[in-house]
Image: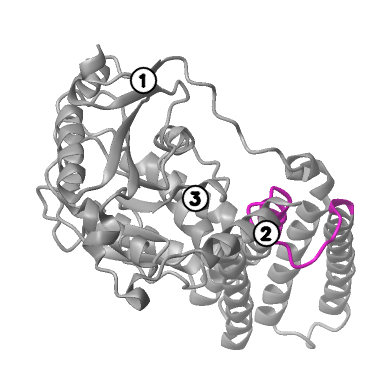
Amino acid sequence: MSTIETLVLTTESVSEIRPVAQDCGVKSEDLIHGATVTVVFPCLNEELAVGQCVRESLEVMRKAGINGSVLVVDNGSTDQSVNCAINAGARVIVQSEPGYGAALRFGFEAATTEFVIMADADGTYELDAIPKLLRPLLQGSADMVLGQRLNDATTVTMPWLHRYVGTPAITFLVRRATRKRLVISDSQSGFRAFRRQEVLALDLSSTGMEFASEMLIRSAWADLRIQEVDTKYAERIGESKLNTFSDGLRHLRQILLLSPETAASIPGILATAMAVTFWVMAAFLGHGADQVGSLVWTLEIVAGILGILGPLVFCTGIVLKYRAESMGLRSSHEEIPLKSRIRRFFSVGLMLVLVALVAFVGLLITMHIQPGVLSQADAASIASFLRSACIVGVMLMAAPLISPYLIASPRSRLPIAEMEHIGMASDL
């Protein structure tokens, strides 16, 4: 059975037993009471805040009647984070594989409760809102609940660039990647509640900060119902580990791999259409093709660049879509063997090169034998088009060289925990 089939079966079977508290007239407080929950904190040098986060989580769950525990996944701390977490009452496991996603994945696998809540061990998230995140799950109205931070965020708690540029941009791309199945405003919130088995069935593979985007995209593909609830957002305690530029690129790469239509195929089609439009405009404008800096000259240069990038970006989308399907990251609607795809690329590339060369010869003959048939602007636009077509063709003919990179590889497995602290502080 394929990964996607397993995922569908799992989510369907779980959906059949989802509780519907509204129909039964059960109060949300009664549902929360006795719920089994593990709060998972990834931790890297958070000695200033991790103990506080653990104690607050345990106290909130105790007051709400939740049968909860806290699991801290240490990701290579060199300070006293581990001791602080244990003394506060947490169970600690150590994951040697670096990365936010690696720590969370390992924590989800190590947890044993029905529900899991993930949060950061830096004091930013409103842990008092744990019952608020659980209620939609227990009432059967959601399969995953996000703590939405943006309404409460300030320039002190969240950098302006993250608040108004980074998070909205990534959220937009995540929503596009799921074909707008998600109606959320804060895709980068790390405060989430969900049923453990449903998320494990997704077989997530990211190891870095892009884990947040992968989790949402693949949850939406699995038809999990995702909601947001407003939560408060506080200033971070300690030094931030977030790298705005590199982590942003990791998110974009993850979205591109999972949904190439969003970041490759559609932009490729648009770029190609713009190139054709500029070539036509340059031909109609007439004179100026031989004048550096003129409008016609500029249009032909831009059209030539877009005419190369557009088709190649579109083909990149096709390649990445195949890779995602072959790795089981998304369902496949057509089964075309890899060799057939490579042959198609090569054949199209060869045809483009041959047609372009023949057309070049025809253009040269026409301009020398019957110079009045085509204007200088028409000839320049056609030549620019044929040059771009020839370059694209040559690059497509190189498809067999990249075919080894399209072979599916298994999901990377996380290394086994090097050490585990099972006892609580009272047991030490």
Q: Give the foreground label among 3 and 2.
A: 3
The Cα atoms of the two marked residues, 2 and 1, are separated by 53 Å
Q: Is residue 331 magenta?
A: yes
Q: Is 201 on the left-hand or right-hand side of 408?
A: left
Residue at 89%, 52% (x, y): give it: 339
Q: Earlier in the sequence, mark 3 or mark 2?
A: 3
The Cα atoms of the two marked residues, 3 and 2, are separated by 35 Å
Q: Amino acid at mark 3?
A: Val
Q: Earlier in the sequence, mark 2 or mark 1?
A: 2
Please tell me the numbered disc located at residue 312: 2
Residue at 58%, 55% (x, y): give it: 258
Viewer-nearest residue: 137 or 236: 137
Residue ID for mark 1: 422
- Tell me the element at label 3: helix
Residue 88 place in picture, x, y as percent: 18, 25
Give the residues in magenta: 316-339
